[in-house]
Every structure is written in structure tokens, then in C-alpha cells.
Amino acid sequence: MAMLKVNDIHVYYGSIHAVKGVSFEVNEGEIVTLIGANGAGKSTVLNTVSGLLHLRTGSVQFMEQDLKGVAPHKVVERGLAQVPEGRRVFLQMTVEENLEMGAYTQPNSTIAPGIADVYKRFPRLEERRRQVAGTLSGGEQQMLAMGRALMSKPKLLMLDEPSMGLAPILVEQIFDIIKELHAAGTTILLVEQNAQAALSVADRAYVLETGRISLSGTGAELMASDQVRKAYLGG
């Protein structure tokens, strides 16, 4: 079943036409990735899906319901959570307070079990539970941003540049976590500049160039594509 359907969306920043007729689907149980250079429109697409930006024309459907005009917090309530680019954790709050904030759409009874689940997946966060988030390393902040999103019990998790600014060993850890989340049943839409890492975990992938999709296929097909290798894989 197509969990998310993005159909011919056009998004503007003022007079700048940032996304030009993008269409794609994410089926239940998949990892789908959007790759592309800086400024290609990848984050704009995610922010439009989550309701942070408004589309000019086109449609976004999640679980067969139209998301046009739906407030971002209502999008989260419907089961779609986003881990934003740059992590955007609450720097003055503790790790545990950040996680509690992630559960604002959930009944109070789910908060303690949800935090326990996050700590099981991210033991480092449990060690830092009383620590102020602004003092965490970049990798720990990324884990916290992912854990905070998981507190909303998402059906679809959108990740925006999760490896940005991280050392290679941490990038490997983050992608291991993505694979674990997927194996546990979470559907994932991944935006990532590290094309090699993204395509290695993706069921399907789309290449975004200057606001348009220029290529699509399975992760393996795009990894083998001359066009993708030359532009994004250094081959």
C-alpha cells in the first residue's frame, strides 16, 4: 500500500520556484531515499510533506488522507514524524525533557514506556538522560533527535540529512540504527547527501536536481547508474 503519495507538487519561496512538479510514493515497509546536491529541493520536499511549508499546486496524501492545510502538529498526530536537518534539539533542556516533548501528541500513559524503548535503542542517551542537550556531541544530538521523533509513535519517519557533520564512524552507527528501525517495522523516507550510504539501505530512490526528479529506481539500480556514480559517488 502507498503510505505516502506526493503528486506533482510545486513549492515557492516568494518568487523562487523551489520544487517543480515532484511526484513519488513511499509504500508501507520501505526505505525510500531522495538524493541530490545542496539546493536541489530535498529538504523543501520533506518540509512540505510535514506541513512546515505550503505547496502552491499538487497534493500530498498520507494514509489516503489529503494533508493540504493540515497543521504540522496534526500531521504528527496522524503518524508522520520528521527529524529535521541540523537536529534542532532543545538545547537548554535535558535529554529526557527533549524526549518528553516528542510525545506531546501521545497519551501520558505512553511516555514512560516510550522513553524506555528509546533508551533500549540508544543506550548512550540513557547514560546522558540528565544532561543538557546543548552539551551533547553531534552524534548524540542526532540520536536524540531521532529518539524524540520516535516518541510520537510514527508510522512513517522522515529523516533529513541524518549524517550531516558527523565523523565516518558515527555515520555508520546512524545508518545501522536506520536499518534497525526499518527491520522493526518503521517505514522511512530519507533525505541524504551521502548518496553511497543512502542508496545502500534504500529499497527505492529518487534523484532530485534543481527541484525536479531526474532519475528513479531501486537503490541498487541507482548505485549502478553511470549518471549517479559520476555525479554523487565520485566514480
Image (spheres, rainbow, N blue to C red):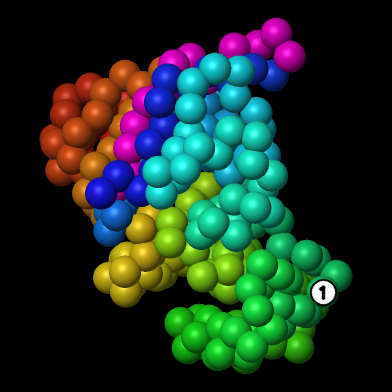
Outermost front residue? 65
Quadrant of the rendered structure where residue 109 is? bottom right
Quadrant of the rendered structure where residue 179 is? bottom left
Residue drawn 51% across and 70% down? Answer: 153
- Relative placement, left or right, of 204 versus 97 is left
According to the picture, the residue beneath numbered tag 1 turns out to be: 93
Outermost right residue? 92
Regarding residue 62, the answer to whether it shows in the image is yes
Q: Amino acid at mark 1?
A: Met
Query: Does residue 184 lie above or below 225 as drawn?
Result: below
Query: Does residue 178 lie above or below 228 as drawn?
Result: below
Q: Quadrant location of the C terminus?
A: top left
- Position of residue 231 measured from the top left corner of the image (x, y, whole percent): 32, 25
- Foreground residue, 47 or 231? 47
Residue drawn 41% across and 49% down? Answer: 63
Regarding residue 168, the answer to whether it shows in the image is no
- Position of residue 61 measured from the top left corner of the image (x, y, whole percent): 45, 38
Residue drawn 65% across and 35% down? Answer: 69
Principal SS element in the magenta part? strand
- Mark 1, Cα crowd under 10 Å, few <14 / some 14-19 / many 20+, is some
Magenta stretch encompasses residue 60? no
| Stretch of the chain drawn in magenta | 14-27
- Foreground residue, 153 or 222? 153
